[in-house]
Image (spheres, rainbow, N blue to C red):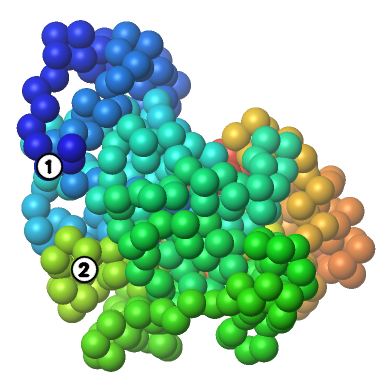
């Protein structure tokens, strides 16, 4: 049970030591943080290690298609007001990476853990969380992830009867369907810009009616629940109707929504909204996202967008035309090798921006932009794209591995 001490067994201690050693060797060899390979080795030596490491923690799990890394960081910052926090801040969100992160938290009181959507149920069973935040579900990594409705059903079945407090987005029908099997749900009106994965009812398959911000199924009666927390402009409304100002260094409406959900989670642990939101202001960037870096004498803002919903949110926060934009797309295993999702992105929103295209799949992206009647240039690499971009700060938008490539190139 979380909150009780559960001293590690000799086998568990050996597994932790071996995992840390392997991770250190991986870092020394220049192969990244080593968290995943270290976690895999540790779990091989002790398959119950994740449960043992979480036993003394009050755990919050955060899962979604978009925004989970940022929300995890915001919640972790808020909960530091109540005690020491351990978190997988670098985004390694499958069991091996989570295990590595928790291995460093022997003195922590709270664990704030980002979890890949496919692994949420299993990680919840292992860590016995006090709180689970469910933000959104949309199409992503089509070659490996389940169709969104199937994923929502898996969450619904796996979380049925959970003792955790579920903090869920009332504006996403798939999230509401998934959370509704749980006995203790806090609904947050966090919004949903991308709606194209939620036009059919997850309960009966009927067509959803979506007047304004509301939604309901006219066939079975499944409908939007009444939220107790809400994002309202630049404020979070709490269950008492009090409005608390949001002051973030992170841009965009999506991050205000993340802050609203994070404030609701923090309240579960007794951290007042004012304190939680004030602490969130400390977050300037998240694993390189939103960082402005200098490269070849130019300012580049690094933005991550992995799927249609993420690109839509990102387009809403970039500077207006004629701000130059560089787009980079890969299709490696960590991205998903299916690039058909490019056709779901509304690239007409980039009209008026000078565009340069790079990345492993730059020609796939070029075809998509051509069909969208956009003016663009295909470049070999970031250096050439920067040189060909007109003056001004450049918005650089990339999917997952392309983003990591860019960070390495600019030394971020």
Residue 399 left/right relative to 77: right
Q: Residue at x 20, y 8 (%)?
A: 11
Residue matched to label 2: 267
Q: Where in the figure is residue 303, as x and y percent of width and height?
A: 53, 58
The numbered mark at residue 338 is none
Which residue is drawn at the image coordinates 33% and 45% (left, top)? 113
Residue at the spot of label 1: 3
Residue 215 seen anywhere in this rendered image of the structure: yes
* Residue 407, above or below 316: above
Say whether residue 196 is visible: no
Q: N-terminal of the two: label 1 or label 2?
A: 1
- Residue 210 occupies quadrant: bottom right
Marks 1 and 2, Cα distance to the nearest angstrom? Answer: 18 Å
Q: Position of residue 81 (x, y in %)?
A: 11, 61
Check disc 1 and report its element: helix, strand or loop. Answer: loop
Q: Position of residue 281 (x, y in %)?
A: 26, 70
Quarter of the image with the C terminus in it: top left
């Amino acid at each position: 049970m979380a909150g009780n001490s559960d001293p590690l067994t000799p086998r568990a201690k050996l597994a932790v030591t071996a995992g840390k050693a392997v991770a250190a060797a991986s870092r020394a060899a220049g192969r990244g943080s080593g968290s995943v390979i270290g976690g895999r080795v540790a779990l091989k030596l002790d398959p119950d290690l994740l449960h043992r490491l979480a036993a003394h923690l009050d755990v919050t799990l955060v899962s979604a298609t978009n925004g989970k890394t940022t929300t995890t960081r915001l919640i972790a910052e808020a909960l530091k007001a109540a005690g020491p926090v351990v978190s997988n801040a670098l985004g390694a969100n499958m069991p091996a990476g989570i295990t590595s992160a928790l291995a460093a938290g022997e003195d922590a009181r709270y664990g704030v853990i980002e979890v890949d959507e496919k692994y949420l149920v299993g990680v919840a069973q292992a860590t016995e969380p006090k709180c689970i935040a469910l933000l959104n579900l949309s199409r992503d990594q089509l070659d490996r992830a389940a169709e969104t409705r199937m994923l929502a059903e898996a969450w619904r079945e796996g979380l049925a009867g959970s003792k955790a407090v579920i903090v869920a987005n009332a504006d996403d029908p798939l999230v509401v369907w998934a959370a509704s099997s749980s006995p203790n749900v806090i609904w947050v009106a966090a919004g949903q810009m991308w709606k194209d994965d939620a036009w059919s009812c997850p309960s009966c398959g009927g067509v959803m009616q979506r007047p304004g911000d509301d939604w309901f199924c006219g066939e079975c009666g499944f409908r939007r629940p009444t939220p107790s927390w809400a994002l309202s402009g630049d404020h979070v409304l709490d269950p008492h109707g009090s409005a608390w100002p949001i002051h973030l260094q992170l841009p965009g409406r999506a991050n205000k929504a993340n802050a609203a959900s994070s404030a609701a989670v923090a309240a579960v642990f007794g951290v007042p909204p004012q304190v939680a939101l004030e602490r969130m202001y400390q977050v300037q960037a998240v694993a390189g996202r939103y960082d402005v870096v200098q490269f070849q004498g130019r300012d580049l803002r690094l933005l991550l967008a992995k799927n249609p919903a993420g690109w839509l949110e990102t387009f809403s926060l970039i500077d207006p035309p004629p701000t130059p934009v560089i787009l980079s797309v890969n299709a490696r295993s960590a991205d998903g090798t299916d690039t058909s999702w490019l056709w779901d992105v509304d690239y007409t929103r980039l009209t008026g921006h000078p565009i340069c295209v790079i990345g492993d799949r730059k020609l796939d992206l070029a075809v998509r932009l051509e069909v969208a009647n956009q003016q663009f240039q295909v470049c070999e690499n970031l250096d050439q794209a920067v040189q060909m971009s007109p003056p001004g700060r450049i918005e650089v938008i990339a999917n997952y591995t392309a983003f990591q490539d860019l960070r390495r190139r600019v030394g971020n």
